[in-house]
Image: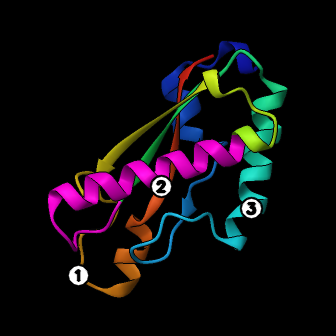
Amino acid sequence: MFARKTLDQLNAEMPLADVFFDYDMSTVRDDARPILQRNADYLRRWPSTRITVEGHADARGTNEYNLSLGERRANSVKEYLVSLGIGGDRILAVSKGEESPVCTEETDACYARNRRGHPVFTAK
């Protein structure tokens, strides 16, 4: 079944979950650790897969700051997955800053949804 799926199908199904960050922080939160453990378990099951971890920020702050924060967030997720035994050569960390929000309302709840590390399959 997995072999027949395209990358688009796999990404649409989202078997790897996003993790969220506190405001102005790039440290992996305690509630993200089990999520990243499940992501690592999935990646171990399919060792040929490669992912890009996109680091995202909310709309507050300058573009430059948010790109830097997104990069730190993406790298935090990558480093955590590597600490769980996933090869660093399978993970690319990139920043999206505030450019790809999942929510555009100017509320705290919306901002919280945008502060994330988002895994995207790039090879299977």
For mark 2, give the secondary structure: helix
Circle 3 crowding by C-alpha within 10 Å: few under 14, some 14–19, many from 20: some
Q: CA distance from mark 1 to mark 3?
A: 28 Å
Task: Give residue 50's position: percent from left, percent from top.
Answer: 60, 23
Q: Earlier in the sequence, mark 3 or mark 2?
A: 3
Q: Which residues are magenta?
A: 57-81
Residue 73 pos. (x, y %): 47, 55
What residue would you read off at disc 3? 33
Tag 3–tag 2 contact (CB < 8 Å): no
Residue holding disc 1: 106
Q: From this view, report whether residue 16 is shown above or below residue 20.
A: above
Please, what secondary structure does the residue beneath circle 1 have?
A: loop
Q: Residue at x 16, y 58 (%)?
A: 63
Q: Quadrant of the C terminus?
A: top right
| Disc 3/disc 2 C-alpha distance (Å) | 14 Å
Q: Amino acid at mark 3?
A: Arg
Q: Residues within 10 Å of mark 1 (few under 14, many from 20)?
A: few
Of badges 1 and 3, the one in the foreground is 3
Viewer-side label of 1, 2:
2
